[in-house]
Amino acid sequence: MKIAILGAMPEEIEPLLANLDAKKIDYANNEFYLAKFGAHELIIAYSKIGKVNSTLTATLMIEKFGAEKLIFTGVAGALKEGLKIGEILYATRLVQHDLDITAFGHPHGFVPGSPIFVDTDANLNEIAQRAARELGLNLKSGIIASGDQFVCDEARKAWIGAEFDASAVEMEGASVAQVCHALNVPFCVLRAISDEAGNKAEFDFDEFVVKSAKISANLALKMVELL
Ligand code: SAH
């Protein structure tokens, strides 16, 4: 099977590439890495940060490189008390917190023709849980909200958490979800916590991004082993 593993930043896919003998292809101002892993063919890339970049890369992974399933791996800010730096969750569903045509009476996150929330694939989520058990990881789950904004503000954090009942915030998952939903490709989103999205979150992010990204990447690779 052809499986895409997508991150947003180099730190999020470097732990994967370190374990693989991958061939690099340059395309559309992006680097795609092709590698064999057991019976599977992997397509690995980092999209660059944000919803537009991740939309482009996810689409190319599916339409140009033929990915049949997609695993997103990366880091996120925690919105809920119980979720700490270094912990990891999978998204049950994803929403764009910054999509706003509420002036027309629509709810936050809604535009006509697209669902507000996109559900992740139940089968992949179950494999993620099995993989986590094998690694001795306590894998949590929850709604993930995405937007083109690094959230490092208590009020914004509280609003996103309350409006969408979201557990974590990041900048790519919901756009990747829309792509996979539209193209009928099963996908899941793994995010290890790098910060708590409140005031000065950027300092925690800088300190923990590499360590947390690695936790998520290891889980993604373990999932591929079980697929
Ligand atoms: N340090 C980087 C910018 C990181 S932006 C640079 O200078 O280039 C944060 C990245 O991590 C995004 O890809 C996003 O998906 C994720 N992320 C982690 N914590 C986040 C938060 N609090 N708010 C939004 N995105 C967050």
Image (cartoon, grey):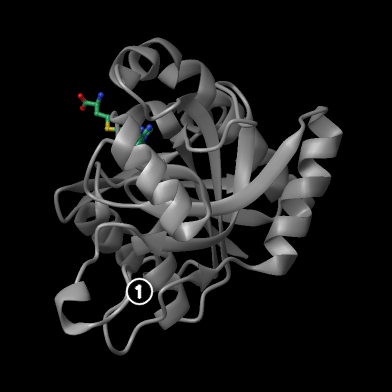
Residue 25, percent across and down? 28, 48
Q: Residues within 10 Å of mark 1 (few under 14, many from 20)?
A: few
- Amino acid type at mark 1: Glu
Residue that numbered label 1 is attached to: 63
| Nearer to the camera, 208 or 61 | 208
Quarter residue 206 falls in: top left
Up-down: is 18 above or below 190? above
Residue at 32% from the left image edge and 46% from the top image edge:
171
Quarter residue 137 falls in: top right
| Nearer to the camera, 7 or 197 | 197
Residue at 64% from the left image edge and 56% from the top image edge:
40
Image-based side of 41 in relation to 24, left or right: right
Q: Secondary structure at mark 1?
A: helix
Image-based side of 151 in relation to 133, left or right: left
Quarter residue 95 falls in: bottom left
| Nearer to the camera, 102 or 114 | 102
Residue at 59% from the left image edge and 24% from the top image edge:
84
Which quadrant of the frame does ligand 1 lie within?
top left
Residue 174, percent across and down? 39, 60
Residue with the most extreme bottom position: 113
Residue 9, percent across and down? 32, 34
- The quadrant of the picture occupied by the N terminus is bottom right
**Residue 5 seen:** no
Residue at 21% from the left image edge and 74% from the top image edge:
102
Ligand 1 lies under 8 Å from the Cβ of mark 1: no
**Residue 147 seen:** yes
Up-down: is 118 above or below 21? below
- The quadrant of the picture occupied by the C terminus is bottom right
